[in-house]
Amino acid sequence: MATNTPAPRTQRLFHSLPSALSSLRTFTASLGSKGYLLAVGAIVLLVGSALSQHFMTSRNLISVLITASVVSVLAVGQYLVIVTGGIDLSVGAVAAVSSVIAGLALQQGTPWPVALLLALLTAGLIGIFNGLMIVYGGITPFIVTLAMMSIARGVAYMLQTGRQVAIEDQGFLAAFTGNVGPMPAPVMIALLVTIVFAVVMAQTRFGRRLFALGGNAEAARLSGLPIKRDIIGAYCLSSLLAGLGGVMIAAQLTEGSAIIGEGYELNAIAAVVVGGASLFGGTGDPVSAVLGGLIIAVILNIMDLLGIQAQPQLIVKGAVILLAVLFTSGVGNKLPGALRKLLFQQRYTGKPAAEADPVGAVPASDKEEADARH
Amino acid sequence: MTAPAGLDLRPLIAVSGVSKAYPGTQALAGIDLEVMPGEIHGIAGQNGAGKSTLVRILSGVEKPDTGEVLIDGKAVTLDTPQAAQRAQIMTVHQELSLVPHLSVAENIYVGELPRTVLGTIHWSKVRTRAREQLLRLGFDIDVRATVASLPIAHRQAVEIAKALTRDARVLILDEPTATLPRHDVNQLFDLLNQLKTLGLAIIYISHHFDEMYAICDRISVFRDGRRVALHDGDERQHDAILQSMLGGVSPDRSAKLQVGPGDMPRLGTGRTEGEVALSVRGLRDGHNLHGIDLDLHKGEVLGIAGLSGNGQSQLAAALFGAEKSRHDQFLVDGRQRRRQDPAHSIALGIGLLPEERKTQGLILTMSITRNITMASLPRFSPGSFLNKAKEHKAAVGMRDALAIKTAHVGEAVGNLSGGNQQKVALAKWLVSGVSTLIIVEPTRGVDVGAKLEIYELIRSFADQGGSIILITSEIDEALMCDRVLILSRGRTVGAVSRSEIEQRGESAILDRFN
């Protein structure tokens, strides 16, 4: 008889799973979106320390933070654009341009703060250009920044002429790779950026206007808010932070290079989305975006420690993004029902379906009715 | 109009006691409607009377709360668009549901394209059949052309042909002539008369009375979610139809009349002269506005009355600077307006309470507080940092003053009922301290109780010296103003004084329509 028990038990487990999940959701919902992220983060940390004894060492954790710092800075910038209902695909390429410009300036013997300013200025101007094209050119953010992604990358290649621009300026390297107090500089920069923009979004007029813009641009405009200026401002800040990220990578690699930051725009968007912000705008906050990025970084780190290859890591990363969005968007609550529908409904009535059914599946009663009629 | 052909006693489609409520508003309150085979049945009513809700229910997009729909006397369930199709009810929507870049033939047979023995699409058959179907309707259209390349009248014919290939017995036309040039309207009418002889039941919804008299056998008048009257589709019924549509036997009319002291309800204080707050001449936008002249005095409530679709919302947008327009003169407090944008208008002390409060007036995902302070953020954020305590105080003050029903002011505006949302939209302008308000259809989609409160709020704004332009298609609201301008096809075509209103009542305004 003992052989019989496993089957019912798995079945029972299967049945109790949805209710367990839903009570987890209720619990996390009561903590708010950040609470949810912290809970997930804690679980990830626990899993990490259970799977590898190297995980919970300060050396490992600090290295994760350093790796995540650039994406965090980019994610904060990306969030500022996403909260308006836009998107910025050019940030990776802008980081490359910025790294090359900083490198070239340093090679000329420019003092490093001036080189930094030059890099940021270029990045900021690119962002303003993006904003102008969106506001006055009437082109959607996706297209504008997609084009800029290509343009900026091309500019970076043309500026660097050789294979890369080596950086030897010790002051620069110390400023961006040294330690500030107990913490590595990149981590401190990311922390500072996160705090500054968390305050901007929560406590300032500009932040409120960005929320309004993403919540309902027309209502914001009719309330007299300067929505054109704010859109340009958001893209400018996103680019500026991308420029800062580029300089940080340049210091870590001791070179400016046109291949820097490939795919970083997608990592930044993933961080924002895992942080619970809607791509339609008007929701989320910078801290959650950074937490979202950190969770991804820690999961990747755990897989590194376990010796999992890079290819399966990509799959896990994608799955994490999907799961996070399912749960933060509230669709997770409807998921069991939707799945049941999808699996157990008829595929196609055979009857014409001119208007697309918004639900995507026809309720069972319809099928019975249709069958009875035929 | 001739009597419906072959009028047998049983209606082809009957709607019985159908009700539908949305949060904060009763869209339909027990509608009955019967359409005989071979009848064209018109539905008239103001915006918000429940016409669109009924269309959505009959086309399976919405489920009614109560009541039923019967085809040939048998109840049918219309819970999905597919179910409506199976019940042989087809709807031709205001925005046509054709795929613009597919050919005419493909559009007609989309979803049930005839196949060859090999399972591929039998193109020659598709084309011949589509062509035959259109010819039967009297249209000679190249069926290989894309729908996007067709004139609108032909697109409509394609839409109807598509409905007929699915054996439609009930055809619903929702504002079919809204985008149709004049001469094409006659072509559509020929087509409808032909469908009539085939025994279809046709429901025809329109704002244009001349069309309804030309084509409809009978006309049902909707008001506030009820069918308040059923008339013959005859021009001689025009006055009666207007009466039931605008004033008539609406159940909340008596409630409205209790607004204000005295016999006549009033929104205004009677100030119709003195200093001019806003003076506009020759306002036009080249599309919907063709010449608006108005003078708004300080403390005056100036009504702008007209049937829906005469340029109301465009007028509000142009006055507020939200849309581009041209003018011969635009003076605010005697000085030329310099820029056409909302921020400038607000700086000049003008606010807009728009008709579409959910899409234009409010940010539904944001809290009551944040919506209320939206138009006066600088005052709540000296040195750009928000003073949240001050914001909260202002919001609580407004909640109490305007009796906004909510547990706390941090609640998202989207969770409020229509009336309370409107109060929040109004509170935004009260907090901002504007002296002139442009108000469009302030009580649309608002329940009776909240309606009265909103009237009170408008009146107290005027009492304290505020000037108001009230753009409305509700005759009752126009009657409450100090002075009324008549809006017709984008022009102000006359003024009705207070004394005229008091002597002649609603006919003082109604007589000027048309």
Image (cartoon, coloured by chain):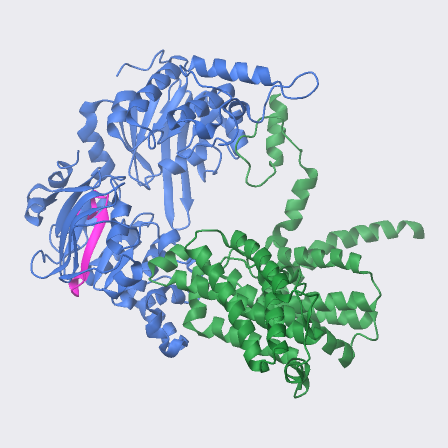
Q: Left or right: where does residue A289 sit relative to residue B160?
A: right
Judging depth in this view, the residue of B347 and B86 nearest the camera is B347
Looking at the rendering, the stretch of residues picked out in magenta corresponds to B462-478
What residue is shown at x 87% (from left), y 52% (from top)?
A: A6
Residue sticking out furthest to the bottom: A181
Residue B289 on the magenta span: no
Q: Left or right: where does residue B411 sit relative to residue A75?
A: left
Residue B465 on the magenta span: yes
Location of the N terminus of chain B by quadrant is top left
Q: Colour of chain A?
A: green
What residue is shown at x 37% (from left), y 73% (from top)?
A: B391
According to the colouring, which chain is blue? Answer: B
Q: Left or right: where does residue B185 sit relative to residue A265?
A: left
Judging depth in this view, the residue of B162 and A270 nearest the camera is A270
Q: Position of residue B182 (x, y in %)?
A: 28, 26
What residue is shown at x 62% (from left), y 80% (from top)?
A: A188
Is residue B289 visible in this depiction of the protein? yes
Judging depth in this view, the residue of B149 and B293 nearest the camera is B149
Q: Position of residue B206 (x, y in %)?
A: 31, 31
Q: Left or right: where does residue B410 sit relative to residue B450?
A: right
Q: Position of residue B457 (x, y in %)?
A: 24, 60
Location of the C terminus of chain B by quadrant is top left
Is residue B365 visible in this depiction of the protein? no
